[in-house]
Image (cartoon, rainbow, N blue to C red):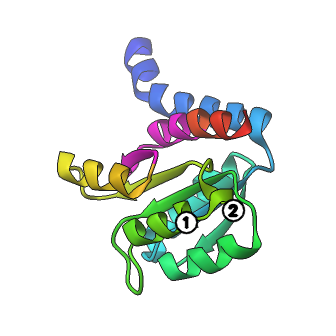
């Protein structure tokens, strides 16, 4: 029974440890979440705040562009499919600005096909995570990209 209990708690323990590692190494770093679905936005916000990150939210690509004009972010998490302006077009426009070329942009999407990944990379995104996101996978991605944006 002890073996079963430890196996079942491993993902939770891993995500808690990863969240703590992010908080230790990157507390206060600024993340822009661009997501139109309220539920997805709330889940992402909770995970980021649990890791002691500062979070701002945009509901579509156009809002993201406006926010990028007046702020500095260490990481942008971008949904692909949104009203007004999708994540691919928003990423192209963000990358057109010299000040934003080095900031990591990660696609968050339910579209898990290779073609979707290719389109994200071609638009200028650096990485790709599928929804629904497992906390341990999400935190691993944050550790990777926040570490690079700090360098």
Using the numbered discs, state the Cα–Cα distance from disc 2 to disc 1 in whole angstroms.
Answer: 18 Å
Secondary structure under the numbered disc 2 in the rendered image? strand
**Residue under the point 57% across and 33% down:** 144
Residue 128 drawn at (x, y percent)? 39, 47
Residue carrying label 2: 55
Tell me which corner region of the image, top left, top right, bottom left or bottom right, holds residue 149.
top right
Residue 45 drawn at (x, y percent)? 60, 62
Q: Which of 130 and 145 is in front in this view?
A: 145
Mark nearer the N terminus (2 vs 1)? 2
Residue carrying label 1: 94
Question: On the rendered image, what quadrant is the C terminus found in?
Answer: top right
Q: Which of 98 and 78 is in front in this view?
A: 98
Give the residues drawn in magenta, as a range.
Answer: 126-142
In the rendered view, would you say 114 is above or below 9?
below
The answer to whether the residues at label 2 and label 1 have Cβ atoms under 8 Å apart is: no
**Residue under the point 46% across and 45% down:** 126
Q: How crowded is mark 1: few (under 14 residues within 10 Å), some or many (20 or more)?
A: many
**Which residue extends farthest bottom?**
84
Q: Does the magenta stretch include residue 130?
A: yes
Q: Nearer the viewer, residue 133 or 124?
A: 124
Residue 52 drawn at (x, y percent)? 75, 49
**Residue under the point 38% across and 58% down:** 123
**Which residue extends farthest top?**
3
Q: Is residue 124 left or right of residue 69?
A: left
Whether residue 7 is visible here, answered yes or no, is: yes
Residue 140 drawn at (x, y percent)? 52, 34
In the rendered view, would you say 67 is above or below 80?
below
Q: In this view, does 1 lie to the left or right of 38?
A: left
**Residue under the point 67% across and 75% down:** 67
Q: In this view, does 20 lie to the left or right of 96?
A: right
């Amino acid at each position: 029974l002890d073996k079963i209990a430890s196996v079942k708690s491993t993902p939770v323990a891993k995500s808690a440890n990863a969240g703590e590692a992010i908080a230790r190494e990157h507390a206060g770093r600024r993340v822009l979440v661009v997501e139109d679905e309220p539920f997805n936005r709330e889940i992402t916000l909770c995970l980021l705040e649990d890791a002691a990150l500062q979070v701002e939210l945009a509901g579509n690509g156009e809002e993201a562009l406006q926010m990028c004009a007046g702020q500095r972010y260490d990481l942008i998490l971008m949904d692909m499919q949104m009203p007004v302006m999708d994540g691919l077009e928003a990423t192209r426009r963000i990358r057109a600005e010299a000040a934003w070329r080095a900031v990591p942009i990660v696609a968050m999407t339910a579209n898990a096909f290779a073609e979707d990944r290719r389109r994200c990379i071609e638009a200028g995104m650096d990485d790709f995570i599928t929804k629904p996101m497992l906390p341990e996978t999400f935190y691993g991605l944050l550790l990777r990209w926040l570490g690079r944006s700090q360098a």
